[in-house]
Structures are given as structure tokens and as C-alpha cells.
Amino acid sequence: MKKIAAALLLVMVGASLSAQSKVREKDILGQWDLVIDVDEARDEIEEELEEEESWIARRFARGISNFALDIVESIDIRFDFREDGELKMSLNVLGEREVEYLEWFINKDGELIIEDDDSDRRRGRNNRSFHFSNDDDVWLMKDGKLQAFEKTRRGRLEIKEEVYLKKR
């Protein structure tokens, strides 16, 4: 009985160490790089293409997805979380640089929320209608990085393994 209790305790401790944790302001202030794990996305696409019956459709879809993923790999996005809920996002896409100003806050559940809905126009900054997130996206700390999650209709969090922020 003691062995079972010890094993159960060990599993619970291991699960809690790998679980996501609430975000605290002092942990996120500063600069972060957006990481999109293209290999993970490529694997998901390959799994979906295996179900396609037509070899021409598979080949065409694989070519388009590889082209799109190559472009995604060339995008450099940096986040600068500032006090008072301001977020400066710098994008470098195929040599073109752009800066957007967003707002961030931590909700009552300890989830980081990034908003971009018309806040730039209120502050008189240039908004080129770049929409970074939607109402269902939240960020939590996991393994020293800010991991993206999507809230389902039932309020559960589904991890977006391929998207996270890494501290600079």
C-alpha cells in the first residue's frame, strides 16, 4: 500500500511540474521572441494529408503548405511587454519592418490576454489592421516560456504546441 501511495504521489508531483502555471506581471515584462514550431505544424499537415485519397490533391496541398510554412519560418516577431499593459510588437516579414502597439493584461485566472482591437486608433497610432489574437487565445507559463492555449466552448484549455514566446 505504501508503494502505491508513493507512486501516486510521484506521478502527481511530476504532473504538476509539467503543468502550466499562472502568469505574473514581473515574469513577463521585457522582450520575448515569438516561436512557431514549423516542424510540428508540418507533421500535423502530413498526418491530415495521409487521409486524402487523390495523390494529385495530396501533392498539390503538400506543395502549397510547404510554401506557406517557408514564409512563416522567415517571419521574425518580437514582443516587448511594458508596464501599464502596453505591448510593442515588432515584425520583420521578408525584409519589411513594422511596429504595432497592443495591450495586454492578466485575467483573474492568471492567464495572459493580448488584445489588439482598435486600441492603436484610440492612442493615435498607426493601425494597419493586423490582428494578432482572438478572444479564445490565452498564454500561460510552461517550462519557462509563455505557451499559447485556446479556450474551447466549454472553457477547457487546448495547448497550441507549435506557438510560444521565449524570453530574450
Image (cartoon, grey):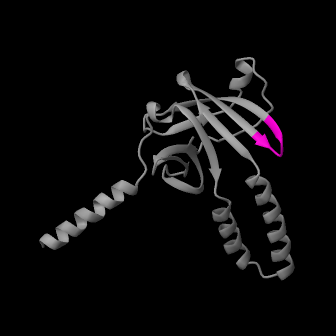
The stretch in magenta equals: 92-97
Give above or below for 134 relative to 30: below
Instruction: Check residue 95 for magenta coloring.
Output: yes
Residue sitting at x 60%, y 35%:
114
Would residue 51 be seen by someone viewing this image from the given angle? Answer: no
Magenta highlight on residue 128? no
Tally of marks: 0
Please give the name of the residue rendered at 64% of the width and 58% of the height, measured from the top-left corner. 37
Q: Can residue 144 be seen?
A: yes
Residue 5 in the image: state x and y as whole percent: 18, 67
Is 4 drawn above or below residue 82 in the view shown? Answer: below
Q: Residue furthest front?
A: 168
- The residue that appears at 72% across and 30% down in the rendered structure is 100
Q: Give the x, y percent position of residue 76.
A: 72, 45
57 to the left or right of 22: right
Q: Quadrant of the C terminus?
A: top right
- Residue at 34% over, 55% down: 16
Foreground residue, 133 or 151?
A: 133
